[in-house]
Amino acid sequence: MNDLVISENTRVTLNFALSLEDGSMVDSNLEQAAVTFSVGDGSLLPGFERALFGLKAGDEAEFTIPPEQGFGQPNEHNIQVVKRDQFEPDITLEVGMMFSFADAAGGELPGVVTDFDESEVTVDFNHPLAGRTLGFHVVIHDVEAAELH
């Protein structure tokens, strides 16, 4: 094990658990293979990465990330009303259903149905964890210098 600490230009191998304020588990790989990422590669929330700074291989830590450093606060402009005919006619809509929509750039944008009637469907395009305080438990297995490209 080396003494390199997590910072910019490091590659980190870890296990994690993500939970909400009420203790409910959102995601975890504690019972699975560790994952490896390079700090700043965009695969993790910047707030999560910053919370890891200073940790080294062998460390175990718990920390809380407020919404502003996680998925942000919900934005009312991300709630849209869509005509019912934009959905397949044979779909039985339910509040909470998630659909994938095409965004302006041609990518996919997930949205959750929050309300509907015969003519319109209200869809929330905010991230499901927007506005939530996130709790992380991490186990750091390895920290090494990242290859710069």
Image: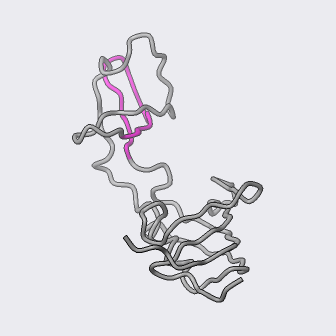
Q: Quadrant of the C terminus?
A: bottom left
Residue 114 or residue 149, whichever sits in front: 149
The residue lying furthest to the bottom in this view is 3
Residue furthest right as drawn: 31
Stretch in magenta: 109-125
User: Where does residue 107 sit, x and y in percent of width and height?
Assistant: 31, 40
Residue depicted at x 65% and y 60%: 19
Say if 66 sits above or below 86 in the image: below
Question: Measuring 68% from the left and 69% from the top, which residue is drawn there?
Answer: 137
Q: Residue at x 74, y 54 (%)?
A: 32
Q: Give the number of callouts.
A: 0
Magenta stretch holds residue 115: yes
Asked if residue 109 lies left or right of residue 62, the reply is left
Q: Position of residue 52 (x, y in %)?
A: 57, 78
Q: Is residue 125 left or right of residue 32?
A: left
Q: With respect to residue 83, does 24 lie above or below?
A: below
Q: Quadrant of residue 117?
A: top left
Does 93 appear in magenta?
no
Q: Which quadrant does the N terminus fall into?
A: bottom right
Task: Name the spot of residue 79 as percent of width and height, x first.
Answer: 33, 43
Q: Residue at x 53, y 65 (%)?
A: 37
For the residue pair 42 and 23, the one nearer the viewer reads as: 42
What secondary structure characterizes most of the magenta part? strand
